[in-house]
């Protein structure tokens, strides 16, 4: 299961992220924790960053550069996969100051984020296996995630070959 945390001070952007991630979760198992407060996000990452696979971070944050913040977090957590989001596509060049796997402009397109998360899930699974997390924690996150857990639906084959319906 992919463990994802996002931080965006904009309520509108968080609502869009929630919707896109909920849509993605219809096909994939994912555990999501979202923050509007930079301070709460920093506290969470200090306590639970080791159990986080992906962070989606806004470049524009209250009182701090999202790029600088993620740079500092990435120094402590080098396997953390970072996705930057911004309503200013021209900021993509600034984002290269920190290793990241994607830069996505608002408004988000579900297919674009889904493709990035598919790759992130494969990488997280490989890293987790190599680090031995699969043995030590038997699939349990190191830091408990909240109840906002999206689960993969059970699919049944439809009467017309190839069609599936969620149960």
Image (cartoon, rainbow, N blue to C red):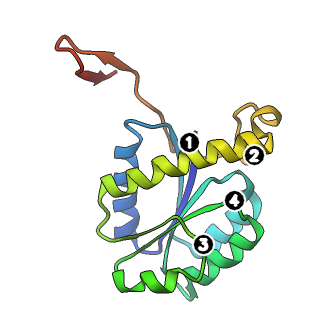
Q: Which residue lies under the disc numbered 4? A: 79
Horizontal and vertical percent position of residue 73: 70, 72
Q: CA distance from mark 2 to mark 4?
A: 15 Å
Badge 4 crowding class, 10 Å Cα cut-off, few under 14, some 14 to 19, many 20 or more, is: some
Q: Residue at x 62, y 68 (%)?
A: 41
Residue drawn 47% across the image and 51% down it:
117
Q: Which residue has dot 2 on it?
A: 142
**Image coords of residue 8 (percent x, y):** 47, 71
Image quarter (top left, top right, bottom left or bottom right) of the N terminus: top right
Tell me which numbered mark, 3 or 2, is placed earlier along the sequence. 3
| Disc assigned to residue 99 | 3
Q: Which residue is mark 1?
A: 147
Dot 1 falls on a residue whose secondary structure is loop
Return the disc, 3 or 1, that comes first in the chain's sequence.
3
Which is closer to the viewer, label 3 or label 1?
Answer: 3
Contact between labelled residues 1 and 3, with CB atoms less than 8 Å apart: no
Q: Quadrant of residue 153?
A: top left
- How far apart are labels 2 and 1 at the CA level? 15 Å
The answer to which of 32 and 54 lies nearer the viewer is: 54
């Amino acid at each position: 299961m992919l463990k994802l945390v996002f931080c965006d001070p904009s309520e509108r952007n968080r609502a869009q992220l929630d919707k896109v991630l909920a849509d993605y979760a219809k096909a994939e198992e994912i555990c999501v924790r979202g923050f509007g407060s930079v301070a709460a996000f920093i506290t969470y990452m200090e306590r639970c960053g080791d159990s986080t696979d992906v962070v989606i971070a806004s470049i524009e944050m209250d009182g701090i550069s999202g790029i600088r913040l993620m740079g500092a977090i990435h120094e402590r957590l080098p396997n953390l996969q970072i996705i930057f989001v911004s309503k200013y596509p021209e900021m993509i060049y600034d984002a290269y100051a920190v290793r990241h796997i994607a830069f996505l402009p608002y408004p988000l397109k579900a297919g674009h984020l889904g493709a990035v998360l598919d790759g992130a899930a494969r990488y997280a699974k490989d890293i987790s296996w190599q680090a031995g997390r699969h043995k030590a924690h038997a699939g349990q996150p190191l830091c408990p995630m909240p109840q906002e857990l999206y689960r993969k639906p059970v699919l049944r084959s439809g009467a017309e070959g190839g069609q599936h319906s969620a149960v």
